[in-house]
Image (cartoon, rainbow, N blue to C red):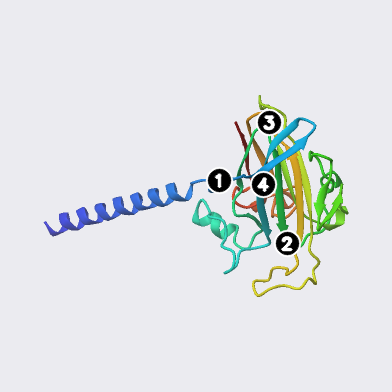
Amino acid sequence: MKRFLMTFVLVLAGVAVVAGIGVFSSINQEEPATLVAKKIGTMKTDKGELDHYELKLDVYPNSSDKVPPPRPTSALQGIQLSGQPFYHPSTSLQVPANSVVTIHFTQYDSGGQIYNPYFAKVHGTMDGTMKWNGKDVTEIKPTEVGHTFTVHQYPEANQPYLFLSVPLPMNAGNAKTDKAGYPIDPQKVSITFITGDAGTYVWNCEFPCGDLYQEFGGPMQSRGWMAGTFEVVA
């Protein structure tokens, strides 16, 4: 009888552990909370006067007590991506269709040489420029890239074409930092573009800031870190 009771208790404990793991995995597989663009007014364009929206994104070299890390989908992913760069506060982005959108980036990471100089240039903005620390530029030096923000189609997607890419300049290695290790005077970039009809796209960083696969693995292929979705909604 005692043996039976012991076996029964162990079975229940095992079921509880499995159920707990299932719940934990389900919670941790949730996508990052969607960051929705906020309306700030209207803007006159060659397509008429359109509603104007904005998003604000920060890029950090690592998490800290000041900025929490992205939520991993598993304990293993949390370990693998510990100390890696990430976009904040989310990599799931939503903007309205047929509107003007401005994205403001604050870039706190270092950087270096990008493999493909194409991504050191600005693509897809209203006038082909980005505003970098108050100045309008069309490109930066390929040796001074921190990250990129690159939006593109899913392969063979049957939806409106959208391609947008902007380089985010690196911070100097000797830049003054705060207690969390982030530059006190980070790089600031703003871009403005016009969306078309509704569609769902992906975005990622094209600077080799990860590990494995020629430094394009790890955070660079992980939602919540350096890749995500870009949804244009009607």
Which of the two discs, 2 and 1, sits closer to the camera?
Answer: 1
**Residue 155: which disc?**
3
Q: Is residue 75 above or below residue 41?
A: below
At label 3, counting other C-alpha atoms closer than 10 Å, the crowd grade (few under 14, some 14-19, many 20 or more) is: few
At label 4, counting other C-alpha atoms closer than 10 Å, the crowd grade (few under 14, some 14-19, many 20 or more) is: some
Local SS, label 2? loop
Cα separation between marks 3 and 4: 27 Å
Q: Which residue is mark 2?
A: 109
At label 1, counting other C-alpha atoms closer than 10 Å, the crowd grade (few under 14, some 14-19, many 20 or more) is: some
Which of the two discs, 3 and 1, sits closer to the camera?
Answer: 1
Local SS, label 3? loop
Q: Residue furthest bottom?
A: 179
**Residue 54: which disc?**
4
Q: Which residue is mark 1?
A: 34
Q: Amino acid at mark 4?
A: Glu
Cα separation between marks 2 and 4: 22 Å
Q: Is residue 13 left or right of residue 81?
A: left
Q: Amino acid at mark 1?
A: Thr
Cα separation between marks 3 and 2: 30 Å
> Contact (CB < 8 A) between labels 2 and 1?
no
Local SS, label 4? strand
Q: Earlier in the sequence, mark 1 or mark 4?
A: 1
Q: Is residue 64 left or right of residue 14?
A: right
- Compare residues 196 and 66 and report the one nearer the observer: 196
**Residue 77: which disc?**
none
Which of the two discs, 3 and 2, sits closer to the camera?
Answer: 2
Q: Amino acid at mark 3?
A: Pro
Q: Earlier in the sequence, mark 2 or mark 1?
A: 1
Q: Earlier in the sequence, mark 3 or mark 1?
A: 1
Q: Residue furthest top?
A: 158
